[in-house]
Amino acid sequence: MELQVIAHARNGFSQKFGIPRQSREDSCIETHIVFTPAYRVREALRGIEDYSHLWLLWGFNEAIRRKGEAARGNEVDWSPTVRPPRLGGNKRMGVFATRSPFRPNPIGLTSVKLMRVEDSKEDGLVLVVTGADLLDGTPIYDIKPYLAFSDSHPTAQNGFAEATRDYRLQVVVGDELRDETLRKGCPWIALEEILSQDPRPAYQDDAERVYHLDYAGWEVDFVVDNATVCVKNVRESRCFL
């Protein structure tokens, strides 16, 4: 079966580091779903504004592992077990019991909140959503309505993910640095949301290590000490397009 790319995600995540590990209902970070020319058909979106949430089926386009140089067709290297980052990277779980990007078929599924439908002269109708855990440029294979009466299961068990469901860090940044960058258009609300979710791999716990995050044209240097993120520096990125 050959999948068609119907759209691409457009947002400020130029690198995988910092992307939310799961979709979140309370996210303020917007992603634009821009359709490819072949699927830029207004009739295909008729009625979509009547839904508050959508399902996105998409591809882990930067996580495909081929079987050597002589791979044929769509043969992909995969492992039956993976090391979830939230378990410290040391404990193995079955790949089908995780949301790891390294799967037999690198397909992702995300529920997002539809904020609005924009009419762009250049791109046609564009879906603006929040809660997407996607890299900028991620290929979208399909979009389906989210139906609360059939898709929501309030009593569902969350497995090992339950332990980190409400995990958050406190973000600390100097007032002078925050005010100065705000005047230049730095998206601090989005950055604080990203940093509070702790983008580090769980096995890295060095309070002296300086981490680097790129988002929406801004570069952030920070350290993490216990449950606190301390922002050291923020500057405009030279490589963001």
Image (spheres, grey):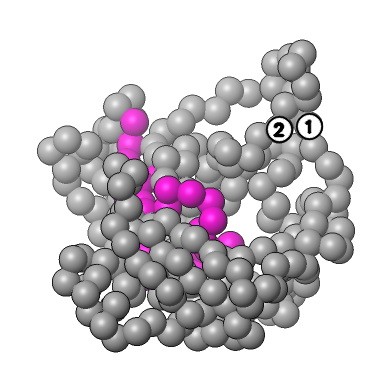
Residue nearer the viewer, 172 or 124: 172
Q: At numbered mark 1, what does the secondary structure look like: helix, strand or loop?
A: loop
198 displayed left or right of 10: right
User: Within the image, what quadrant is residue 203 found in?
Assistant: bottom right
Question: Is residue 59 visible to us here?
Answer: yes
Q: Main secondary structure of the magenta part?
A: loop
Determine the residue positioned at 23% across, 43% down: 125
Q: Amino acid at mark 1?
A: Asp
Residue nearer the viewer, 154 or 81: 81
65 displayed left or right of 57: right
Q: Which mark is residue 109?
A: none
User: Within the image, what quadrant is residue 128 found in?
Assistant: bottom left
Q: Residue 19, image x and y in percent?
A: 51, 58
| Residue at numbered disc 1 | 77
- Work out whether 30 lies above or below 27: above
Q: Amino acid at mark 2?
A: Arg
